[in-house]
Image (cartoon, rainbow, N blue to C red):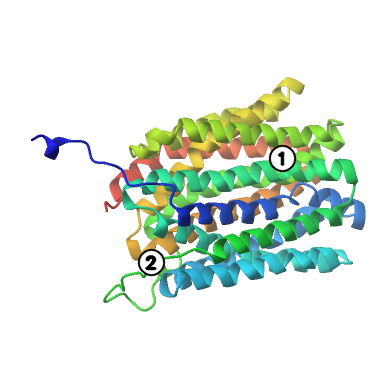
């Protein structure tokens, strides 16, 4: 018989627990990014904040997330991951009530900063649970789809938020919607069933790798450069479109096009991720995104304004899932929480720099300079990835 040479059957990818984790992750990011593009408009309208003050206020959550994420990875790797996830998700959900009640810019800044703590912890816990519930033979592919749920929420939520604001002009309605969506996410993860993990013997009590995987440092630098770009684009496209281009509803279409590009790119790249071609996906995505950001910075016309987000979606749909898998493939099984926190710390650091720098560039030199700064960062990241980071990963990756 030739049964011994028949191709190995792949384990099912879309099991029930994985679907719950995916739903929880999508709703987590959707609720958070639903209000992201309208917050600069809200701060300008309600509190007459200038551009650099807007950048300062909006970057508060990034600082909080950066503080909590290294400890989140350690906690997730040390305690029951399901319980940690539920606790963090509940605190994330309840923080949305603070936006509704904030009556001053100081109170709003405080709420936004505090919200970064459970946001940072929940993203680490949820992504680590996703790794746990996936069959090992489908992990690269499964985490690719998981990364898409982040990206898809970050692209579709601003579209919905801008649309709701354009037809109602009601900021607090959006805060209430975010609260409701976050509750649905909490409900989704509450029913997840996880397997008992094997205890790792002779694990050191305290070390740097409990908080940040130093062996992944160059991947982290690359991720900072890419996160910076999204920090500028997600926070300033809507107000830039309104103030400089006279586009209101068009900003929502901008993010919808990104979402369409993400979906197509992720589906088209599923086979290559399943085959483990991570660096190829990452390089292709980084270069495509660089072209899109450069086109947007050039701003040759309305056609380019809508072509650029398509390239951003196609590029990020390949780049981010590949990077997520690269971080995970460089970590031991008992370091998955720390690997997830490492990529998220790096992404958030880049986001924070982008939000602050974008506000400062817009205030001092105009929005065009802010978006050229974004394009330069992406180009630098793409070059670093192509010539150094990809070889760095190949030398240090671990095999299951």
**In the picture shown, does residue 192 fall above or below 55?**
below
Residue drawn at x 27%, y 75% is 201
186 with respect to 34 (left or right): left
Residue drawn at x 66%, y 66% is 92
Residue 141: x and y, percent?
40, 43
As drawn, which residue projects farthest toward the front?
A: 1
Residue 31: x and y, percent?
69, 54
**In the image shown, does 251 or 367 lie closer to the viewer?**
251
**In the image shown, does 298 or 274 lie closer to the viewer?**
274
**In the picture shown, does residue 167 fall above or below 100?**
above
Residue beneath disc 1: 370
For residue 111, say whether it is visible: yes
Residue drawn at x 66%, y 24% is 307
**In the picture shown, does residue 240 fall above or below 92?**
above
**In the image shown, does 155 or 353 lie closer to the viewer?**
155
Residue beneath disc 2: 195
Which SS class for mark 2? Answer: loop
Q: How many marks?
A: 2
Which is nearer the N-term, disc 2 or disc 1?
A: 2
316 with respect to 33 (left or right): left
Per the model, the C-alpha gap separating discs 2 and 1 is: 47 Å
As drawn, which residue projects farthest toward the left?
A: 1
**In the image shown, does 44 or 218 lie closer to the viewer?**
44
Residue 63: x and y, percent?
64, 63
Residue 336: x and y, percent?
40, 61
Q: Quadrant of residue 173?
A: bottom right
Which SS class for mark 1? Answer: helix
For residue 365, say whether it is visible: no
């Amino acid at each position: 018989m030739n049964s011994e040479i028949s191709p190995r059957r792949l384990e099912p990818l879309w099991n029930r627990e994985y679907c719950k984790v995916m739903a929880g992750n999508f709703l987590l990011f959707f609720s958070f990014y639903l209000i992201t593009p309208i917050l600069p408009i809200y701060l300008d309208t309600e509190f007459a904040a200038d551009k650099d003050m807007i950048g300062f206020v909006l970057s508060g959550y990034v600082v909080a997330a950066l503080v909590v994420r290294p400890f989140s990875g350690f906690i997730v790797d040390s305690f029951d991951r399901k319980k940690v996830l539920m606790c963090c998700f509940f605190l994330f959900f309840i923080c949305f009530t603070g936006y509704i009640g904030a009556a001053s810019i100081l109170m709003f800044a405080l709420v936004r900063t505090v919200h970064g703590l459970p946001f940072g912890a929940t993203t680490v816990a949820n992504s680590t649970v996703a790794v746990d519930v996936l069959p090992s033979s489908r992990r690269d592919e499964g985490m690719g789809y998981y990364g898409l749920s982040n990206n898809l929420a970050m692209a579709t939520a601003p579209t919905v938020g801008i649309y709701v604001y354009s037809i109602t002009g009601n900021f607090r309605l959006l805060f209430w919607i975010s609260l409701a969506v976050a509750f649905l996410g909490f409900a989704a993860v509450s029913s997840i069933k996880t397997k008992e993990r094997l205890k790792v013997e002779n694990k050191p009590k305290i070390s740097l790798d409990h908080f940040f995987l130093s062996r992944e440092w160059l991947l982290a630098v690359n991720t900072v450069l890419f996160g910076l770009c999204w920090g500028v684009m997600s926070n300033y496209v809507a107000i830039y479109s309104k103030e400089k281009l006279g586009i209101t509803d068009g900003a929502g279409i901008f993010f919808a096009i990104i979402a369409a590009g993400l979906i197509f790119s992720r589906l088209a790249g599923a086979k290559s991720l399943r085959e483990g071609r991570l660096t190829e996906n990452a390089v292709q995505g980084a270069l495509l995104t660089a072209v899109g950001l450069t086109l947007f910075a050039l701003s040759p016309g309305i056609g380019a304004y809508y072509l650029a987000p398509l390239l951003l979606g196609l590029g990020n749909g390949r780049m981010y899932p590949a990077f997520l898998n690269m971080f995970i493939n460089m970590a031991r099984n008992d370091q998955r929480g720390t690997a997830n926190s490492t990529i998220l710390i790096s992404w958030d650091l880049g986001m924070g720099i982008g939000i602050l720098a974008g506000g400062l560039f817009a205030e001092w030199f105009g929005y065009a300079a802010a978006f050229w700064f974004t394009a330069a960062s992406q180009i630098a990241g793409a070059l670093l990835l192509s010539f150094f980071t990809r070889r760095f990963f190949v030398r240090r990756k671990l095999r299951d």
